[in-house]
Amino acid sequence: MLFGLTLVVFLGIAVLRMVSYQRREREDARSDGFPSGERPRTDEQKAKDKRAASIWGGLAVLVPCLLVLAYYVSR
């Protein structure tokens, strides 16, 4: 129960921080002259995003597979 509560609190704080960061970035972009509120992405940022997506995608597949393997080995 404590683990679940800790997870919910952690996720809540992470989401609130992410939303406030995005709002601040949007306001800064508008003040710099980008009416849509979004700055154009640089090639470096696009490459970094692609790397991060590959890592998180791999983890999303790898972790459940390791858990299933651990279950079968320990059974």
Image (spheres, rainbow, N blue to C red):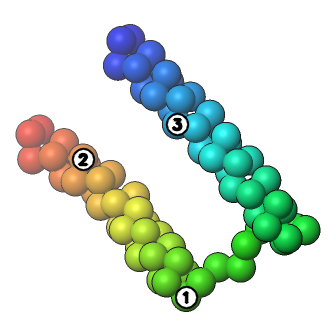
Identify which amino acid the numbered label 3 is placed on: Ala
Q: Earlier in the sequence, mark 3 or mark 1?
A: 3
Q: Which residue is mark 3?
A: 14
Residue 60 is left or right of residue 66, and the answer is: right
Q: Quadrant of residue 51?
A: bottom left
Can residue 61 be seen here?
A: no
As measured in the structure, the alpha-carbon distance from the residue carrying label 3 to the one carrying label 1 is: 27 Å
Give the answer, above or below, for where 7 lies relative to 46. above
In the picture, the quarter occupied by the N terminus is: top left
Q: Which residue is mark 2?
A: 67
Can residue 63 be seen here?
A: yes
Residue 71 percent location from the top left of the image = 19, 42
In the picture, the quarter occupied by the C terminus is: top left
Front residue of 71 and 50: 50
Give the answer, above or below, for where 22 lies relative to 14. below
Asked whether the beta carbons under mark 2 and mark 1 sit within 8 Å of each other, the answer is no
Q: Which residue is mark 1?
A: 43
Front residue of 45 and 27: 27
Q: Earlier in the sequence, mark 2 or mark 3?
A: 3
Residue 41 is left or right of residue 53, and the answer is: right
Residue 57 is marked as none
Identify which amino acid the numbered label 1 is placed on: Asp
